[in-house]
Structure formats: structure tokens, C-alpha cells
Image (cartoon, grey):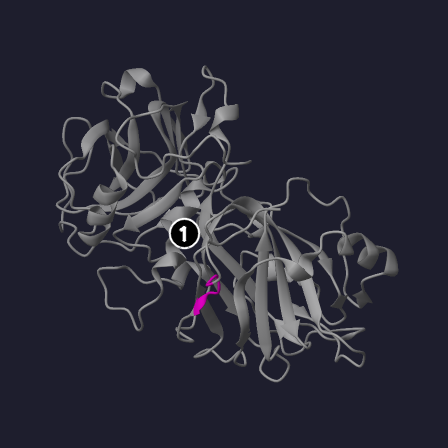
Amino acid sequence: MGLLFQGSAGRAAALTFCSPLRKPRKNSRMAERRATAAAEPDFLQFNDLACETEGGKVIFATDEWFAPAKNLLKREPPQFIPSAFTEFGKWMDGWETRRKRIPGHDWCIIQLGVPGLIHGLDVDTSFFTGNHSPYVSIQATCLDELPSFTPGEDRTGMAATAAQIAAVAKLSSEVWPELVGVAPLQPGYAERCHHYFRVSSRSRVTHLRLNMYPDGGIARLRVFGVGQRDWSSIPANQDVDLVALTNGGVCLGYSDAHFGHPRNMIGRGRAANMADGWETARRLDRPKTLKADQQGILQVPGWEWAVFRLGHPGLIGSIEVDTNHFKGNFPDSCRIEACLLTPEEEARCVQTRWNSGKWEVLLPPQKLRPHHRHHYSKADLTPTWPVSHVRLIIAPDGGVSRLRLWGRPTLVTGAPANQNTASSKL
């Protein structure tokens, strides 16, 4: 197990209980160029390292009488169905334990789908209005060997067995360092259901312990951070997806995310649907009558963009831009720019919303097709150099489901923003 913090001040800073995210995912975040109802913490644009679609699992829970703990990690926002009941009571889209009548409190252990550095958490009590957990705390650790036990698929109406309790006791999770000290939770009404906690973990995390005091319900747990892997284990002649979430890629900025966040593009596999991709609103500056150039690319004044930091600086040799599911709302064209930045340069770019003068063209403008995987080889790219950041630009607007940047990790001088050390563990 690895210590997470330097010094003793390792607890999270709780942010204001905040803006509702109850609408379906495609409408959950308005475009940046439009006014927003309330400011949200900046860590929300990072990856959800615990999401079930990225491999996150609940491997132990003390009690799951009304609703199983695995619901905590669902990708979809929680929902409420007034008429839905099970043989154990009211059906709830979250984790809900029975009313405790024995000493102790309820807790569960979560195995992150993507181990990494955690920057913030969202404890969501949506729809738990008279049955939410009054208090919560969260602990974390890095395990060299993963536990071999699993709680099973359907745990509704069940509690941990004596054998499971004995197995989990070997992890000594009660003494793991705290990410979030004991903090109060509010009932799950729309205006106060999200509880944001900014944390500053200094080491790689693989597992969390979520404590409810003493019992009750929580709808979702989002764990926002950046993946870490051991790049020293990658053969020198092997191409990897340098921007993949699982390899430490992360979105650092974007122009518009009206129907879907650009971080979706670096997720596992192919997109499940349009909501599992990046989709912008229709630009209002589109010409009344559209015209194209000799390549068939529409001549429009505006575009949308998303910036990513690669998991490791490298030489990009091929690119995939996938418009899967986007059949009537795909972009007309795209291009990709790239640069190599130090941490200080990255910080300045974030402050200026990425109006950096270091961008150079990596992939010239390309006409796109609907519902199609577009592959670009080295011959399609401009002469390559080591890069740490890329900017995908689409015109005039639309949706992209996945972005893959295949290349080889490269050691560079000047301490790029994300240069991982060989001691990082996978």
C-alpha cells in the first residue's frame, strides 16, 4: 500500500453544494460560450476513474438491502421511478442499505477501473430525500495485488457474509489514508444533491473505501482524475494510443460541450451511442447558404475545439477519428494541431483558454463522413515531432465519438507537463 499525501493535511476541501445535473447526459453541460447557471469545479472535466464503463467495480459492501452498491458507478445520471418496487422495498437507483439495528456503520470498497491521481469527487444523493446517508468519508490506497474476492452480480436484499468480511479484513481498509474526512450530506433534492470535494492525492490510487454514517443511500460516486501507467513496460517498437483515458490522457479544455463532453472521446472501446461521444450545439454563425471548396470542405467562419494532454509525450504515427452513431450531426471536417508544453506553459494556456501560439498542424483539414471510422496514416500527417498536447478542431459543429492517437512514447527534455516517471505502477 502506498501513502497518498505529504504531511498530515490530507483531507479534501468541500465545495459548495451545487448545481443540479439531473437532466439526461446530453443536456447536462451547456456550451462554454453560453452563460451558465452556476460555476462548477474545474476538476469535473477530468476522467471518471471509477465509472463502470471504464472497468470500475464495487468488490465489497456491508449491506445492499434496498439497492446494490454497484449502482454508484453507473455512467448514466440517476433516475427515479415512483411506481418501482422490489420484494425488498422501494427500488432506488443508487446504493441503499437497510436501517441499521446493530453497532457500526455501512461501507463499501471500490476498485478503480483506471488507477491514477485523483483531483476531485462528487458524492451525489439524487432522489434520496428522506433516506440519504447523513455523513460520508472516503479513504484511498494503492494495492500491489488486487483482492481475489467479488461480491457477486445481484446483491439486492443481501449483506456481506462472514467469509467476505474475513477476506476484506485482510486489506486493513479502516486505516487507509483519508481523501475526504467525515462530511455531512444533504438530501437529494436537485438544488443540493451534488457534494463536490477537491482533493490533492500525491500518489497513484487503485482502491477507495466509501463510508456511510451510519446507513442510508447515495446515488452516485464520481471520481475525477488522471490515469497513470508504467510506461517503462512498453516495448520501444510498440505503438500505443497516447491519448487514451487508460493511458493517462485527459481533456484540459473545450469550446462547447452542449450534448456530450469531449472526454468521452478517449474512453474504452467504441461509443455505445451518441451520448458516449462529444457533440456540440449547432453554431449560430453558420452561413445562410453553405458553399464548399474544391475538396468538398464547407467554407464556414466558425469551428469548435477540444484540447487533450497525452498520457505521455510521443511521436504520433497514425490517427483515428470515429463518427460512430453521428449520422445526421457529424462534423463536415476536422483538423488536428499539436505542441510540446512544459507544466508552466500548460498553466498559461489554461488561463488563456488555449490561445497558444505554439500550435502546429499535425493533420491538415479532412472531410468527414457520417457514422464512420476515419483512419489517417503517417503519410497523411505533417512531419512528426514529439508532442505532449493536441487540439481537435471540427467545423462547423457536430459530434465525434472517439479519437485515437497511435504512436510511441518518447523521452524529451524540458520536463513536459505530463512526463511520468518509470516508478509509476500500472
Q: Between 121 and 132, which is closer to the camera in this rendering? A: 121
Could one spot residue 395 in this view of the protein? no
Q: Is residue 335 above or below residue 375?
A: below
Magenta residues: mostly which secondary structure? Answer: loop
How many numbered marks appear?
1
Up-down: is 85 above or below 304? below
Residue 322 horizontal side relative to residue 272, left or right: left
Q: Amino acid at mark 1?
A: Phe
Image height check: is 314 above or below 137?
Answer: above
Relative placement, left or right, of 27 versus 303 is: right
Residue in the foreground of this view, choosing between 6 and 181: 6
Is residue 244 shown to the viewer in this render? yes
Q: Residues within 10 Å of mark 1 (few under 14, many from 20)?
A: many
Residue in the image at 58% along x and 72% along y:
136
| Quadrant occupied by the C terminus | top right
Residue at position x 20%, y 29% in the image? 361
- In this rendering, the answer to whether 265 lies above or below 222 is above
Q: Position of residue 425 (x, y in %)?
A: 54, 36
Q: Is residue 150 left or right of residue 14?
A: right
Point out the residue furthest to the bottom here.
130
Residue 378 in magenta stretch: no
Residue 330, given in percent of the width and then of the height, sits at: 34, 43
Query: Which residue is depicted at the point 69% across and 42% down?
Result: 146
Q: Which secondary structure, mark 1?
A: loop
Image: magenta residue range: 9-13
From the top left corner, tell me how far across and down residue 79 is, in percent.
Answer: 56, 69
Farthest-out residue, right: 162
Tell me the residue that label 1 is attached to.
Answer: 46
